[in-house]
Image (cartoon, helix red, strand yellow):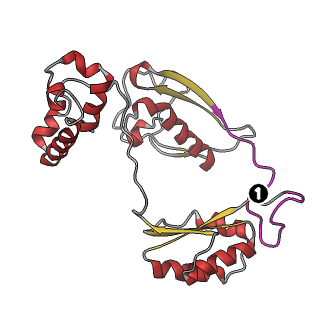
Amino acid sequence: GSIKSNIGHTQAAAGAAGIMKMILAMRHGTLPATLHVDEPTSNVDWAAGAVELLTASRAWEENGRPRRAGISAFGVSGTNAHVILEQAPAPATELVPAPGQPTQPAGAALSVVPVLVSAHDEAALQAQAGRLAATDADVLAVGAGSVRRAVLAHRAVVLAADSEELVDGLAALAAGTASPRVVAGAAGEGRLAVVFTGQGAQRIGMGRELYETFPVFADAFDAACAHLDLHLDRSVRALIDGAEPELLDQTGYAQPALFAVE
């Protein structure tokens, strides 16, 4: 099978994506189908061996041995690597105890558990916190269940080491009062950071077709150049257009040019 049939070629991340897919296949006990296969390649003699192309998902049955699989990474710039994965042994104990069972092994310290709450608006968030505060579920069970819920616009995290702390934090959230156990806010609040590619991706004429085709790109590019040109002794646009080709490989010019395009 191939991860490319799911998400396309991931370039430098090809091997990492393949490992993710295979771990999920092991976890679910399913050999996933390769998608979009109209006809297998004629360059392989499919009748002369034990290799076949999975065109339909298949159960990955237990056979007394750990599941094992090989993943090849054929990534960008000549990456060629292979790794063999083996199914992990079953955990000795369950992370979330069954009802009526101890919440932790004897002598172990219970760490702080994050309980996630989210809703479409602040009033709904407070109402949900009030409903959770009224339950007597174990803090581990509530925390484990909370990460499976939808992530909506208004969010809060209640940090609790035990059920008593959980109820206190949820009650404070429901009442709209401040608590050191609660972190809350709406999506979009807070500061934003954007990370761009490193030096090495620059080239003469980069972004030219985008500039000519999409006015929104042209406007953003012009605005970036206007700010950057105040701090440089060359025009960013002229550098990208190839006025002095050798300068575009120098850090002081390459990185502003990349920023303007990206």
Q: Which residues are magenta?
A: 85-108
Q: Is residue 90 above or below residue 202?
A: below
Q: Position of residue 162 (x, y in %)?
A: 75, 69
Left or right, 103 with reference to 128:
right
The residue depicted at 67 percent of the width and 38 percent of the height is 67
Q: Is residue 93 magenta?
A: yes
Q: Position of residue 223 (x, y in %)?
A: 18, 44
Left or right, 8 with reference to 122:
left
**Mark 1 highlights which residue?**
94
Q: Which picture quadrant has residue 197?
A: top left
Q: Which picture quadrant has residue 55?
A: top left
The residue depicted at 30 percent of the width and 26 percent of the height is 252
- Residue in front for this viewpoint, 132 or 46: 132
Q: Is residue 9 magenta?
A: no
Q: Position of residue 116 (x, y in %)?
A: 58, 67
- Residue in front for this viewpoint, 8 or 128: 128
Answer few, some or many: residues within 10 Å of disc 1's Cα (few below 14, many 20 plus, some between 14 and 19): few
Left or right, 73 with reference to 108:
left
- Residue in front for this viewpoint, 156 or 19: 156
Residue at the far left: name it: 212
Type of secondary structure dominating the magenta stretch: loop
